[in-house]
Image (cartoon, rainbow, N blue to C red):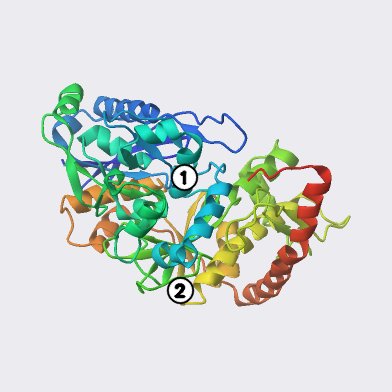
Amino acid sequence: MSYVLGLDLGTGSMKGLLYTKTGELIFSHSEAYPVTSEKKGYSEQAPKDWIQACEEIITKMIEIVPDSKQQLEGISFSGQMHSLVLTNEEDRVVRPAILWNDVRTTKQCDEIKERLGDTLLKVTKNKALEGFTLPKILWVQENEPENWQKTRHIMMPKDYLGFYLTGVYYTDYSDAAGTLLLNIKNRSWSSEILEEFDIPSSYMPKLYESSGQVGQLTPGLKEKFGFETDIKVFAGGADNPCSALGSGLVSSETAMVSLGTSGVVLTKEDDEDVNYEGTLHVFNDVMSDQLYSMGVTLSAGNSLHWYKNTFAPEQSYDELLTKAAQIELGSGGLLFTPYINGERTPHTNSQIRGSFIGLDNQHTLDHLTRAVIEGITFSLQDCLSLVEENKEIKEIISVGGGSRSELWRQIQADIFNAPVITIESQEGPGTGAAMLAALGLGWYHSVEDCVEKFVSYSEPISPVPENVKLYNEIYKVYQDVYQNTREITARLNKVTGVQDES
């Protein structure tokens, strides 16, 4: 029996998934590692922890599935986007990785906007935000010149893991697109941007297709783990497009809605010239020559987590959602905006804060619960509305914790006005990584054939016309809340001395 291993290098842990040619998952294991925060707004990680996690996963895999020593054919990756890894000429890590959720780089983002102007959107199709890689590079240049002097290679986390396994410096187009250094249309590093910020082109890794083979497991590691055959290693991709692939998203008329800590709306784009002028991210996909657009609401599941821990710590999520299902649509005239950590799409406002609007003495905890779920879904509709300015979305693939709730799927169907399906086995972007290895090995004739083996869906939940009509009216009110509270929350932060936490 032949196997592929998908390694998902996340922010808090790495997950390994071993699949057969028939798409059967036969091994799953996670290894956690810490995130450090030396100062407020800092978020860093030691790349050696990723290596240790990877070795633990492979060791455990061989223990549980002994014939993987003979039958493992390929490895690929998904990984946290944007995070910065620097190595020197001896291939040693120069400093801890600066992660995607590190927000120390506001000054550098302003500098990028000032120096590049319209060129940034034209070349990269994205705005300069703290999460991206280029601002992190400028921060190191300005604040740690001694570390920049040592630097000879720039890469992202999954690519450092790939380097460890193969000895090859590389990245794929989907991860490269999140650096603000890639010419999205030309699929090449932007010499214009590199030169503007004194970044030698030799520091940038070679670009590969996500399903492209970058090398083989090194002889030393092959011997260390006791593998008996050569194992091909494939480039892999950024976590969001890998998650989309693992969800079976192949049509531009379908959107994936992910209800994790943050919320993501992602759809494929057929037009290579698509440009949302920075209101949505546009990146290269893990599928060759495709683009995808993505909107992000910062606190989706995080809002529900905060709400539960604050107001109902003794109840399970299932209990909360079961009781919320008994509350009428619209939560009895109550609205919640999930801006508890600021917002990304469509507002890009780190100062805005969340609100309950319309509270009265008839409202119960269950009304508040339903309002939180509806408010999170309205925030995702903000993202979807931008997509629908260009095209019609005919189906939603809902993934993440919230997609397990029939109530929440129905609310999504009614607010999005589209049928909602979810995948039966939700293993996240690691499934997409394994699929990239399978495609690279030539196991399937097409992406569609691969999806047929790896992905199965629930029955769709359809929108209810009268619910759609009422939610449309409530959504208009929801949109007004941002416009009428942004200055209030900014003033409140200033008066009370509360600093930006996002």
Q: Position of residue 135 (x, y in %)?
A: 48, 48
Mark 2 or 1, closer to the camera: 1
Q: Position of residue 31 (x, y in %)?
A: 40, 30
Residue 395 — which label? none
What's the residue at 60%, 68% (across, down)? Answer: 415
- Between 27 and 337, the one lying in front of the other is 337
- Between 112 and 277, the one lying in front of the other is 112
Q: Position of residue 240 (x, y in %)?
A: 42, 53
- Between 435 and 386, the one lying in front of the other is 386
- Residue occupying the far right of the picture: 361
Residue of label 1: 138
Q: Amino acid at mark 2?
A: Lys
Q: Position of residue 215 (x, y in %)?
A: 17, 41
Q: Amino acid at mark 1?
A: Leu
Sequence-earlier tag: 2 or 1: 1
Q: Quadrant of residue 59?
A: top left
Q: Is residue 445 above or below residue 22?
A: below
Residue of label 2: 394
Left or right: 402 as drawn, with respect to 369: left
